[in-house]
């Protein structure tokens, strides 16, 4: 009986000491600085404005939307649209010296290192370009020394492929600044001249032979949400 009472007393004393030690550890843990909570994900959608974008045909501005896929966001689908101005070496008596074209370059972006403060991506894009502009051309005839002008409707269609490299810098959780650059090839380069006059005829179509090198560069401001 004496041994039982002694054992019970030792167990009770050990329990009290353990509770006191645990309480002391809890108080110390409360006083220690807690680690910062992980930064919340800003979302899987990115809208970008390109105040400066340039291609081989000219320069202008653009707008794009990107959808990031998966929990790690290592793949994205991007849909950029650009408006570009082409400087034309036309005669001084022509009605216009610039033409306007619209480009649509949907593509896939691959993020090999995931989403970081400084993020790199690479991926292929298709290139569709189209523009329709009215111009006035002058023609000089040596036999009588006269010049004839005609109003011409010029259409240009381009189809190609570009591999782009992307580098973006995260300013805040949602705001990004980025740079894009790529090089590729044009498979189709079609120009159509349409005029009611007698010198050009009703319509003339011109194809550029072979593959032609093309490229693009953009500076972007993005919002992730």
Image (cartoon, rainbow, N blue to C red):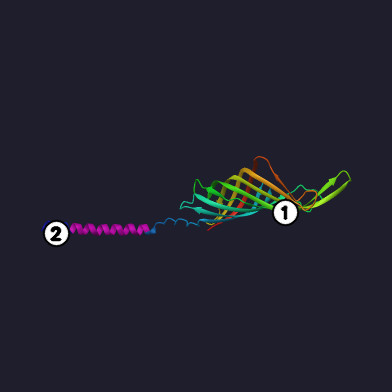
Q: Main secondary structure of the magenta part?
A: helix
Choose between 171 and 63: the one closer to the eye: 63
Choose between 213 and 54: the one closer to the eye: 213
Identify the residue shown where x is 31% and y is 59%. 23
What secondary structure is found at the residue carrying circle 1? strand
Place of residue 62 in the rendered image (x, y in percent of width and height, measured from the top left) = 63, 54
Q: Which residues are magenta?
A: 9-29
Which is in the foreground here, disc 1 or disc 2?
1
C-alpha gap between disc 1 and disc 2: 105 Å
Left or right side of 95 for 67: left
**Few, some or many C-alpha atoms within 10 Å of disc 2 (few <14, some 14-19, many ≥20)?**
few
**Few, some or many C-alpha atoms within 10 Å of disc 1 (few <14, some 14-19, many ≥20)?**
some
N-term mark: 1 or 2: 2
Identify the residue shown where x is 18% and y is 59%. 9
Tell me, for residue 5, which label it has, or none.
2
Furthest toward the left, the residue is: 1
Magenta-colored stretch includes residue 26: yes
Place of residue 107 in the rendered image (x, y in percent of width and height, measured from the top left) = 56, 49
Give the quarter of the figure containing the N terminus: bottom left
Place of residue 44 in the rendered image (x, y in percent of width and height, measured from the top left) = 50, 56
Q: Which residue is mark 1?
A: 133
Q: Are marks 1 and 2 in contact (CB under 8 Å)?
A: no
Identify the residue shown where x is 84% and y is 46%. 140
Left or right side of 192 for 148: right
Choose between 213 and 61: the one closer to the eye: 213
Tell me, for residue 6, which label it has, or none.
none
What secondary structure is found at the residue carrying circle 2? helix
């Amino acid at each position: 009986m004496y041994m039982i009472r002694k054992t019970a007393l030792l167990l009770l004393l050990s329990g009290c000491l353990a509770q006191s030690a645990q309480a002391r550890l809890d108080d110390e843990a409360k006083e220690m600085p807690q680690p910062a909570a992980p930064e919340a994900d800003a979302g899987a959608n990115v809208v970008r404005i390109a105040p400066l974008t340039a291609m081989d045909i000219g320069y202008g501005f653009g707008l794009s939307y990107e959808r990031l896929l998966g929990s790690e966001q290592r793949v994205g689908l991007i849909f950029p649209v650009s408006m570009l101005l082409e400087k034309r070496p036309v005669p001084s008596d022509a009605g216009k010296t610039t033409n306007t074209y619209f480009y649509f370059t949907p593509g896939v972006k691959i993020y090999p290192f995931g989403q970081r403060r400084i993020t790199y991506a690479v991926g292929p894009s298709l290139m569709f370009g189209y523009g329709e502009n009215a111009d006035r051309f002058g023609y000089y005839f040596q036999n009588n020394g006269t010049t004839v002008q005609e109003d011409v409707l010029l259409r240009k269609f381009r189809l190609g492929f570009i591999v782009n490299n992307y580098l973006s810098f995260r300013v805040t959780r949602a705001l990004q600044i980025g740079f894009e650059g790529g090089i590729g090839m044009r498979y189709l380069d079609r120009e159509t001249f349409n005029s009611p006059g007698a010198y050009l005829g009703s319509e003339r179509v011109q194809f550029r032979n072979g593959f032609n090198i093309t490229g693009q560069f953009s500076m972007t401001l993005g919002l992730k949400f």
